[in-house]
Amino acid sequence: MTLNTRGGVRRRALVAILAVAVPLAGCAAPAERPAPAPTRSATAASAPTETAAAPGLMPGTCNEAAPCRLQQGTFHLQPDSVLSGLRLTIPSAGWSTPTNIPAELKLVPPGLQDATLIIWTEAVAAKSSGTGRGSALPGVRSDPASLLAWLDANPDLTVQKTPTRTIAGMRMPSRVVTPSPTVRFGDPECPSEPRCAAILTGSPDLWHEDFFAIGYPETAQLYVGGPVRDAQGLTVKNLIVALDAPDPDALARLEAVSRPLLDSMTRH
């Protein structure tokens, strides 16, 4: 689920589902690249279409309205992406990406509606509910150990520790999270108000006022590792790989279909 401006639910391309109050898997997509401007020959009735991307450089001109369909094979991330030098293998046809920007990479698997795999770096803890929900918590450090300790102690989340996994050459501890029964999010636009919870945000120059939040029964699995260096030798404090799904059963299916992709991740 995507929320922004600290006060309203934003679904971007998923507004129709919000209208029937069905919680969605999703994520904050700050500073999203706009869709390419239409040419003079385009008409107002023209609908955005997917573009196909062959293995190689991960495409960066995609958006929610016109995602890029990824062919099976290995892709790598360019310098202006979330972690330059990261390589991953798309295991089968049907995967797509609506977002590949410095703040995040979002990958959508085939056959799983509203389920996504998201990659962030330099994420920080967000105030989970109430006044100021979604804003950064300055008292929580952004190293993996601190983020995990904050998740484990957060009363607005129901948290389950899950096995550590090797991703991109790092051992990454994991947590499965969903909004707790006692959370009081404080936004009437939350589709399961009051049972929504903000979890992560990032630097204002990349995330602006966006933040990642989930609404029950939406469930996310967060792999948290770091620090890590990108292809330019710059060190980022954390790498977070999230599996976000509408409910626990969908998360189990997402984990199964994502397993080969997670295992394929390497760094340059």
Image (cartoon, rainbow, N blue to C red):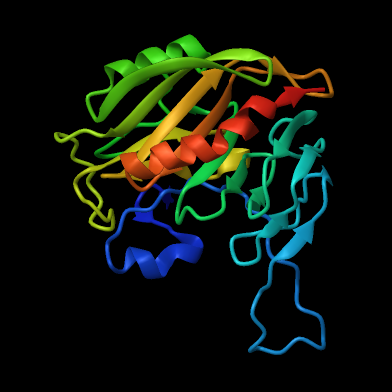
Decide which of 90, 138 is in the foreground and name it: 90
Residue furthest left as drawn: 182
- What residue is at 42 percent from the left and 48 percent from the top? 25
Q: Can residue 140 be seen in the rendering of this structure? A: no
- Residue 113: x and y, percent? 45, 56
- What residue is at 28 percent from the left and 16 percent from the top? 153
- Residue 128: x and y, percent? 31, 34
Q: Is residue 18 above or below residue 6?
A: below
- What residue is at 39 percent from the left and 22 percent from the top? 175
Q: Is residue 190 left or right of residue 125?
A: left
Residue 91: name its quadrant: top right
Q: Is residue 60 above or below residue 125?
A: below
- Residue 200: x and y, percent? 45, 33
Total of numbered circles in the picture? 0
- What residue is at 27 percent from the left and 56 percent from the top? 191
Question: Where, quadrant-wise, is the C terminus in this rendering?
Answer: top right
Decide which of 51, 10 is in the foreground and name it: 51
Q: Is residue 102 left or right of residue 122?
A: right
Decide which of 237, 71 is in the foreground and name it: 71
- Residue 171: x and y, percent? 58, 12
Q: Can residue 57 be seen in the rendering of this structure? A: yes
Decide which of 237, 243 is in the foreground and name it: 243
Q: Is residue 108 above or below residue 253?
A: below
